[in-house]
Image: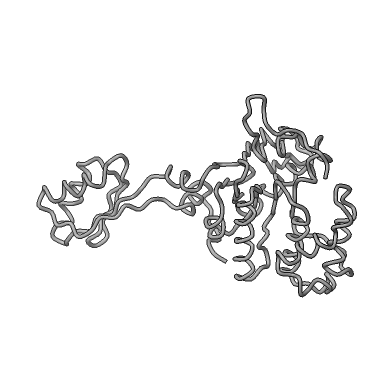
Amino acid sequence: MTSTTSTTSAAGTQHPAVRTRGLTKRFRSGQVAVDGVDLEVPRGAVYGFLGPNGSGKTTTLRMVLGLVAPTSGTATLLGEPMPAAGPRVLPRVGALVEGPGFHPYLSGRANLDRLDAVDATADPRTRDRRAGAALDRVGLTAAARKPFRQYSLGMKQRLGLAAALLRPRELLVLDEPTNGLDPQGTREVRHLLRDLADTGTTVLVSSHLLGEVEQVCTHVGVMSRGRLLVQGPPQELAADGEATVVVTTTRACVEGASRLLGDLGLVDVQAEGTALSARLGMVAPEKISAAMVGAGLDLVGLEVRRPSLENLFVELTGEGFDVAR
């Protein structure tokens, strides 16, 4: 294995696994595919890179990996500038971008052996062990001798993951890794990503499956029309949105409860039957319940609804999202 340079600054602060500043890609047609993206993936994170098709996710990942030259801006991997440091850094990075590409007439195992053989940093004496472990990790041991052209889409994705896992990696960059997988395969990939994160591997994964991202990711970034709209821990991003309070009363008290909510400073008060909803703002929920009781109004129920990651996505992009497979 090649030696690596330090990824800490003079002050001892560890660099993010991935950082971009003003990363932009403009095609000759004038189309701006990626527009000034400042991506920051902390070490040890599972970072979900979210966005609809055509939002610029894949182009961003390709620039980060040095596969496409940016029009402007910079990118670093593991504290090293890309693409200049690619030969030194990329052996520490596993990647699956825009689907796996393998020789169709070779078996899955033979394809992995070929990839391993061209890695100058890999020890050929342990090749069999590495390939076998990678196939086992993605559930392809039984299909190892089967020609790649006979693989289903899900099996091809699994082999792509196995290729990314041939060596211990500090960073994995995965573009839609669950594409074509059945629900069981999707769950297995989710567990695999968690296991990798537990061992210190940083994972940057693009996805359109919001439910999967919410279950496994420690950080998310939302892309739309080439721009990174927001990024951070999902709980913090959702908490930044405005909460809604739903007060349930009796039919005789609906009008009085509606007036009371307005007097307390809540806005967008709406009634549907005996339930009233309003934007909570800075009003404490207990203040609402105390005011209802103090005014002699029936209080059947009070619920505070915090915005979800799905709500945030729709609010930011104006687009829907595939929440489940």
Image vertical order of residue 103 relative to residue 261, above or below: below
The image quadrant where one finds the N terminus is: top right
Drawn side of residue 272 relative to residue 89, left or right: left
Residue 9 location (% of width, % of height): 67, 28
Residue at image point 68% right, 59% down: 177
The quarter of the displayed image where residue 191 is located: bottom right
Residue 323 location (% of width, % of height): 53, 61
Image vertical order of residue 104 relative to residue 30, above or below: below
Q: Nearer the viewer, residue 181 or 322?
A: 181
Residue 234 location (% of width, % of height): 50, 48
Q: Residue furthest front?
A: 125
Drawn side of residue 307 relative to residue 303, left or right: right
The answer, for residue 264, to whether it is visible in the render is yes
Q: Nearer the viewer, residue 187 or 14?
A: 14
The answer, for residue 55, to whether it is visible in the render is no
Image vertical order of residue 291 relative to residue 150, above or below: above
